[in-house]
Image (cartoon, rainbow, N blue to C red):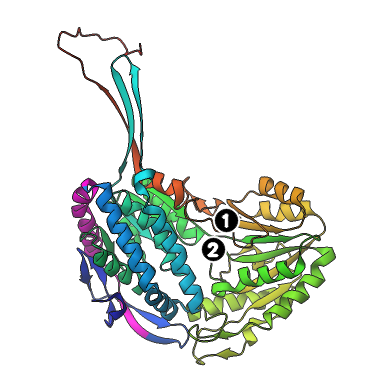
Amino acid sequence: MSPSAITLDVVPHWFDGKPNEGAGARRADVFDPATGETTRRVALAEHADVDAAVASAAAAFPDWRDTSIARRTAVLFAFRELLHRRGHELAELITAEHGKELSDASGEVARGREVVEFACGIGHLLKGGMSENASTGVDVASIRQPLGPVAIVSPFNFPAMVPMWFFPIAIASGNTIVLKPSEKVPSAAVWLAQLWAEAGLPAGVFNVLQGDKLAVDGLLAHEDVKAVSFVGSTRVARHVYETGTRNGKRVQALGGAKNHMVVLPDADLDTAAEAAVSAGFGSAGERCMAVSALVVHESVADEVVVRIAATMAELRVGDGRGNCDMGPLVTAEHRDRVASYIAGAADAGAEVVVDGRDVEVDGAPGGFWLGPTLIDRVQPHMSLYTDEIFGPVLSVLRVRTYDEALTLVNGSPYGNGTAIFTGDGRAARRFQHEAEVGMVGINVPIPVPVAYYSFGGWKNSLFGDTHAHGPEGVHFFTRGKVVTSRWPDHGGARSSLGFPQND
């Protein structure tokens, strides 16, 4: 069956290489955010389903671990070719359940595919080292081996790209997977499972467990799950990290963000304004790398706000499938929550320059609509600034000096991404050195690293010490082993209780 032919009323789990509607009757609605209508229902895991998914991964692990790197790589290449050829189908699924504009969804698929391509070089990435004659007749070698069944818990905002930050490297390294997608956007995971099967991945290597908190907590507690990769809010990331490590698992938990973009007086203001609009409102602001706090030098703040507002006036909000720039938010509840911050900022004395609550849309009246919003003269004590909003709201904070801007950036409890716009190389170099943030852009508003570098923040944006994909991803999904060997010519060696020494 083609991955585009998912027509089930219930979006299923995927165990042992085939769909499975689960052990219980619990279901959740899946919406089209552009219409507000329920389009299908998703199975929610019971404890028996958690056990079944992990059992499938555990049973497949020994054979997959022992499969040669050459054969594993061949499957990765086949998956990459299928994804390249049919990625538009996946993008359409994402738009239908998440609401993001179709070209944005296609970009998500393309960035995820970059990690697949990186993992295709796993033979080089898994190379160990060897020292011959480290001691007389003794050789020492280092190797890296897979962990076993690993769990991936992904958020609603990137149903394809975020899982692909993890599973290509994990699979290429010889691990098996249980992917727990967000129940708001469940279909992309099943599509990917079907594509893996078509690429020749053995049954049980890639499994999908649909569900809610029960499924997440079940994976965190399961003794056969060796590692967990998580992306989501800081509150849940902390829970995942603390629970997983307490249960003896290796955990990388990427949390929330409050990303600042600093604009200095010598910046190209047209470029900065366009970048702020793109980084603030792309994917309706539902990105962990979205710019939500624009920190502008007072001398150019009025001009920057005017330019941003003029650019925003040209944005079109619609159903994501037609001629529009931005789609709806993912749920009605999330839309209402984001709108409440706009009202709260106005009550607190900030200036609502462009109010997304008044947006005119090209779409059904029941859609989860909220237009791009620009709020000036925001103060650091306001909840609009302190909280992660995860919506199309751009806050402008005015500063008088570079040091004041840096204090805002470094004073945030989050440290995911930041950017500076300037024509001064000395200021840029100073910022990249002094910013206490994991990913820094210089005249680049969303500094998401390419796949062969690693993605991750600092402070409350990351729990655990390993970032996603790139070299750190390979390290996370493998463990090191050192082998010391000697092959004496004949017997007659004399026993010694002394501590061995090199000679």
Residue interval drawn in magenta: 39-66
Q: Nearer the viewer, residue 326 or 114?
A: 114
Counting from the top left corner in percent of width and height, residue 146 is at 30, 45
Magenta stretch, main secondary structure, is: helix
Q: In the displayed structure, does residue 431 sit left or right of residue 466? A: right
Q: Quadrant of residue 21?
A: bottom left
Label 1: few (<14), some or many (≥20) within 10 Å? many
Provide the secondary structure element on which disc 1 rests: loop
Q: Nearer the viewer, residue 220 or 208?
A: 208
| Residue appearing at x 62%, y 61% in the figure | 259
Q: CA distance from mark 2 to mark 1?
A: 8 Å
Provide the secondary structure element on which disc 2 rests: loop
Q: Is residue 158 visible?
A: no
Disc 1 target residue: 416
Q: Nearer the viewer, residue 326 or 322?
A: 322
Q: Nearer the viewer, residue 213 or 6?
A: 6
Quick check: is 57 in the magenta stretch?
yes
| Residue appearing at x 66%, y 75% in the figure | 344
The amino acid marked with disc number 2 is: Cys
Residue 288, numbered label? 2
